[in-house]
Amino acid sequence: MKRIICVAASMLLCMMLASCSRQPETENNPGSVVVGFSQLGAESSWRIANTASMEDAAKDAGFGLMMENANQKQEKQIDAIRSFIAYQVDVIVFSPIVENGWDNVLHEAKKAGIPVILMDRMIETEEKDLYTAYVGADFYAEGRRAGEFLLQKADAMKAEHLNIAEISGTIDSTPMRERQRGFMDVIGGDPRFTVIDSISGDFLRSKGEECARQLLDQYGVGGIDVIYSHNDSMTLGVLDVLEKQDIKPGKDIVLITVDGEKEAVDALKAGKVNCVVQCTPNLGKAVMELVKKLKSGEHVAGTYHPEEGMFTEFDDLSNPAVEGF
Ligand code: AHR
C-alpha cells in the first residue's frame, strides 16, 4: 500500500513539474523563473478571469507558472505552498481564501528564502515580513462605493426607511470583511437604513440562489427593500430566484453588486440591477512586474491597488466605457 502511495506521489510531482516549463535564459528573461501560484478556487467568473490573467501574464513575462487550485480549501492551499517550497520556486504567489492561519507555512517559505506575494486577498498576521507585497483591490473602498450609491438612491426615492439584506462572501475573507465594513461606515449612522440580515453565500451563484430563497421566506417581498450582495455570481443567483417569483429585480428590490462581470453589467443596462461596483480580476500583469523586480534584486514592498470605480443606474449606460469583463 505504502509503495502505491509513493508511486502515486512521485507521478503527481512529475506531472506538476512537467506542466511548469522553465523558460530558456534570454535577454528579456533574466534566468529561468518559476512562480508557484496557489489559486483558492473557481467559485466565480471573477476567479476564472483572475486565473486566466495570471496564466497570460506569466506567459507574456516568459515565466513558468506552477499553479495549484485549492477548490476552496485552506488546507489544500497550505499543501500547495509546501510543495512550492519543496520545489524551490523563485517566488510564491497566493490568494488566501481567509485571512487567518497562514503564519506557520509562511515561516517555512521565509526560512527557505522564497519571497511571497499576496494576490487578491490579504492575511491577518502580526509579522508583516512574512510577505513581500500585496496586489489586489481596495475592498474597503468598494464597500464605501456601494454605500454611497445607496445614499444617492435613497435620496432619489425620497425613502424614509429602507430594509437592507446583505449576502456576504466567504466568511473571514478580506473582501467579505472589508466590503461589509466600508458599506456600514457609509450607511451605518443614517436612521433611514436597517440591515435586517446578513447571510453568507460564499461567493457562489448557487448559494446566492439559496440565500435569496431563505430571505424571501423569512421577510417576504415587502420586507426587503435592498439586497447588497458581495459579488456578481451571487447576485445573478438572486436574480434567477426573484424573476421566478415574479418579483422585479431593480424595481421591487434594489440590487447592489460587486465585481463587474459582463452578465451583471448587462443586467444593470436592462434595469435589473441598480449598481455594479467594479473589482478587476486582471491582476496578473502587476504581479509579474513585481516578480521581475524581485528577480532583478529590486526592493519590492507595499500595497498595489488597481484603479476601480462603479457603474450605476444614474450613469449614461449607453457609454461604451460601461462594459464588463
Ligand atoms: O476576492 C475577490 C472576490 O472573490 C470577488 O469579488 C469574487 O467574485 C471572488 O470570488
Image: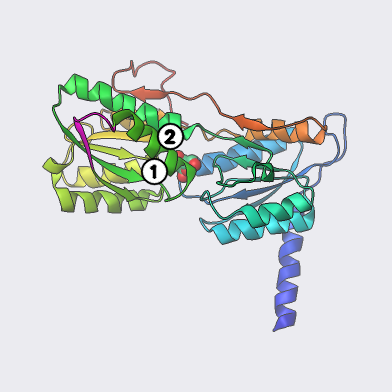
Question: Residue at left 69%, top 42%?
Answer: 129
Local crowd size for mark 2, using a 10 Å CA cut-off: few (<14), some (14–19), many (≥20): many
Local crowd size for mark 1, using a 10 Å CA cut-off: few (<14), some (14–19), many (≥20): many
Which amino acid is tagged 1?
Ser
Q: Which quadrant of the view contains residue 312?
A: top left
Question: Residue at left 51%, top 55%?
Answer: 72
Can you see residue 45? no
Horizontally, residue 312 falls left or right of residue 59, namely: left
Can you see residue 123? yes
Question: Residue at left 24%, top 24%?
Answer: 153
Horizontally, residue 292 falls left or right of residue 143, namely: right
* Mark 2, residue position: 261
Residue 166 in percent (x, y) is at: 30, 42
* Disc 1 secondary structure class: helix
Q: Residue furthest bottom?
A: 1
Which segment did they paint magenta?
A: 188-195
In the displayed structure, 47 sits above or below 318; it is below
Residue 233 numbered mark, or none: 1
N-terminal of the two: label 1 or label 2?
A: 1
CA–CA distance between discs 1 and 2? 9 Å
Which amino acid is tagged 2?
Glu
Residue situated in front as seen by the camera: 262 or 235 = 235
Tell whether circle 2 marks a residue whose Cβ is less than 8 angstroms from ligand 1: yes
- Residue 77 among magenta residues: no
Horizontally, residue 285 falls left or right of residue 111, namely: left
In the displayed structure, 56 sits above or below 153; it is below
Residue 123 in percent (x, y) is at: 56, 46
